[in-house]
Amino acid sequence: MSVSKPVNKDLIGSLIFLALSIAYGASAQLIPFYPGDEYEPFTARTLPFALSVLGAGLSFSLLISALKKTSEAKPDQPVLKSALGYDWSTVIKLLSLMVFYALALKWLGFIIATTVFLFGGYWILGERRKKILFGASLPFVVAFWFMLTQLLDIYLAPGQLFSAFGG
């Protein structure tokens, strides 16, 4: 008679995140070099690869802690009971919001689309105080926009809606 260990959300999440991090690291190696970048210390591959290593390390540590939890769990718990307890309506709403953000980014531009995305995400997750919603969305987006456009000199298109009105 085999005793099955319960599978919890942390275990499933860490395995999924580990797989995504490894896939991201593998796809980062497909990014082409610009001519002459082969011997540079920082290239187009550096940051994506570093993020994949960081993600894999964090997910691996979460995997270890989840395995410790499951080894300490009672063997009579049903398998996958805690893993199936997701709030699926919230998951679907957040996934829909991500699709909306991807589609709206081209039309609304970075600042408006990202502010709406963060505002909507906080709203879906249960935050209703307007000070928190705007205070956690707009200043963060403007600071990030400033960092990207002014400090790193990365061009972010203003959006087709803004351009249509003469911006």
Image (cartoon, rainbow, N blue to C red):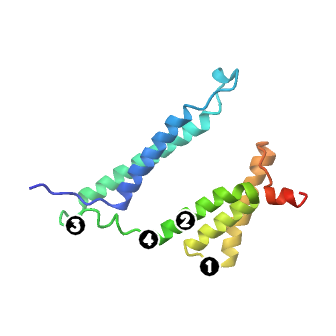
Q: Residue at x 80, y 56 (%)?
A: 160
Label 1, label 2: how far apart the Cα atoms are: 16 Å
Q: Residue at x 61, y 38 (%)?
A: 47
**Residue named by callout 3:** 77
- Please say if the residues under marks 4 and 3 sit with CB atoms less than 8 Å apart: no
Tell me if I can see residue 140 in this picture.
no
- Which one is closest to the eye, mark 1 or mark 2? 2
Say which quadrant the C terminus sits in. Answer: bottom right
The amino acid on which the numbered mark 2 sits, given as a three-letter code, is Leu
Whether residue 127 sits left or right of residue 55 in the image: it is: right
User: In terms of secondary structure, where does tag 3 sit?
Assistant: loop
Mark 1 vs mark 2: which is more N-terminal?
A: 2
The amino acid on which the numbered mark 1 sits, given as a three-letter code, is Arg
Mark 2 vs mark 4: which is more N-terminal?
A: 4
Label 3, label 1: how far apart the Cα atoms are: 36 Å
Whether residue 134 sits left or right of residue 67 in the image: it is: right
Residue 128: numbered disc: 1
User: In terms of secondary structure, where does tag 2 sit?
Assistant: helix
Label 2, label 4: how far apart the Cα atoms are: 11 Å
The quadrant holding residue 50 is top right
In the displayed image of the protein, which residue is found farthest to the right?
Answer: 166
- Which one is closest to the eye, mark 3 or mark 2? 2
Q: Residues within 10 Å of mark 3 (few under 14, many from 20)?
A: few
Residue 37 percent location from the top left of the image: 68, 24
**Front residue (pair 104, 82):** 104
